[in-house]
């Protein structure tokens, strides 16, 4: 039987303590920021658009996974959240604050941003509702946008959370969505003076990630795609892909790769080059099986990374 790369109740506490965001006692300024992205397939409908709210059975396992993530992570970006109120009540930990937007469609997949105290997620003056509505094309999702701030009120990073249009044939739409985000960045964020992160499910196929990075860079600041050594962030056995990403720009330096947590990758799939980077992830539990993960959690796995945000942060090495 092939071993799988898995996520456990002790996962983040045991392997990510070194990457948690830290705060200076002298000035209460954050010098690092840890962020994760997690697409929870059709949350509120039990994992399928054909279901009803009565079919949602994943709250217990999701609450444990998300709570463990926030033990060491500062910011969580969530996609496919149909029932935001239920998510906040039953899945999000009590010590985090979550922000999304209103949508009257019964099966709309919301993007949600949650931030752990003492950090806060504050609206831009130009986007008091926390969204850039025109990033949504047709019936896709808007971008959720705001400033992650520390206790002093300093902007740690400008965060743009996305869930771009899915399916291979919609590559032009995804690139247009990225260009729209770039236009907002150019108009509304101080060019090059503050860190900017674009995080979420980009639904990338073929050369989409490169093209999206280029489109974001038309904002006037150069965006980098944080490398993820794992081949997949999505795996439902029938299809596998790397949909979830972190792009970053400005005075911010990654201190880790983008890491994938969950059973979307096997040891064999990593062995070609970067398996050693993921050795500490190979822990088996009742959710270590991909079929169990797909049934009880999602068809996506989490991605997470840590960035240095102090003025003297080292330059990117990943």
Image: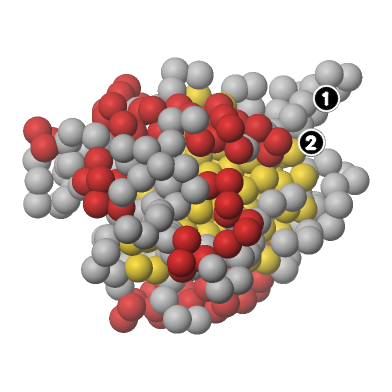
Q: Is residue 54 left or right of residue 237?
A: left
Which quadrant of the figure contains the C terminus?
bottom right
Please tell me which residue lies in front, 295 or 311.
295
In this orientation, does residue 162 appear?
A: no
Above/below status of 305 relative to 269: above
Above/below status of 180 relative to 146: below
Q: Secondary structure at mark 2?
A: loop
Which quadrant of the figure contains the N terminus?
bottom left
x then y, percent, for residue 283: 47, 43
x then y, percent, for residue 248: 66, 58
x then y, percent, for residue 36: 53, 44
Mark 2 neighbour density, 10 Å: few (under 14) some (14–19) many (20 or more): some
Q: What is the tally of numbered marks visible in this picture? A: 2
Q: Residue furthest front?
A: 1
Q: Residue at x 64, y 22 (%)?
A: 118
Q: Residue at x 83, y 41 (%)?
A: 310
Please tell me which residue lies in front, 156 or 92.
92
Find residue 191 and name its label.
none
Q: Residue at x 63, y 59 (%)?
A: 276
The residue pinned by badge 2 equals 31
Above/below status of 20 relative to 35: above
x then y, percent, for residue 216: 60, 68
Q: Is residue 263 left or right of residue 147?
A: left
Mark 1 neighbour density, 10 Å: few (under 14) some (14–19) many (20 or more): few
The residue pinned by badge 1 equals 24
Q: Residue at x 58, y 32 (%)?
A: 14
In this orientation, does residue 106 appear?
A: yes
Q: Secondary structure at mark 1?
A: loop
Sequence order check, earlier mark of 2 and 1 = 1
Q: Label 2, label 1: how many angstroms apart (C-alpha)? A: 7 Å
Tell me, yes or no, whether the two marked residues, 2 and 1, touch with CB atoms within 8 Å: yes
Please tell me which residue lies in front, 178 or 184.
178
């Amino acid at each position: 039987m092939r071993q799988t790369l898995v996520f456990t109740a002790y996962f983040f506490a045991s392997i990510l303590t070194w990457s948690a965001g830290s705060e200076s006692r002298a000035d209460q300024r954050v010098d690092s920021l840890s962020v994760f992205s997690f697409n929870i397939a059709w949350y509120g409908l039990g994992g399928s658009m054909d279901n009803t709210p009565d079919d949602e059975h994943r709250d217990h396992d999701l609450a444990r996974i998300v709570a463990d993530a926030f033990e060491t992570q500062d910011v969580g970006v969530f996609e496919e959240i149909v029932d935001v109120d239920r998510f906040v009540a039953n899945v999000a930990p009590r010590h985090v604050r979550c922000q999304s937007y209103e949508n009257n469609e019964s099966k709309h997949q919301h993007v949600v941003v949650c931030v752990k105290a003492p950090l806060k997620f504050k609206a831009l003056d130009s986007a008091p509702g926390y969204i850039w509505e025109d990033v949504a094309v047709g019936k896709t999702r808007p971008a959720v946008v705001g400033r992650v701030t520390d206790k002093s009120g300093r902007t740690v990073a400008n965060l743009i959370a996305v869930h771009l249009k899915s399916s291979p044939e919609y590559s032009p739409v995804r690139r247009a969505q990225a260009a729209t985000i770039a236009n907002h960045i150019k108009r509304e964020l101080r060019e090059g003076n503050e860190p900017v992160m674009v995080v979420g499910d980009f639904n990338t196929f073929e050369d989409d990630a490169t093209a999206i990075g280029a489109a974001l860079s038309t904002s006037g600041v150069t965006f980098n795609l944080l490398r993820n050594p794992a081949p997949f962030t999505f795996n439902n056995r029938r299809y596998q892909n790397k949909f979830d990403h972190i792009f970053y720009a400005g005075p911010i330096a990654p201190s880790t790769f983008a890491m994938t947590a969950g059973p979307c990758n096997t040891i064999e799939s990593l062995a070609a080059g970067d398996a050693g980077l993921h050795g500490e992830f190979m822990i088996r539990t009742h959710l270590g099986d991909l079929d169990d993960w797909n049934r009880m959690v999602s068809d996506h796995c989490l991605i997470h990374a840590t960035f240095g945000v102090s003025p003297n942060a080292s330059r990117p090495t990943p």
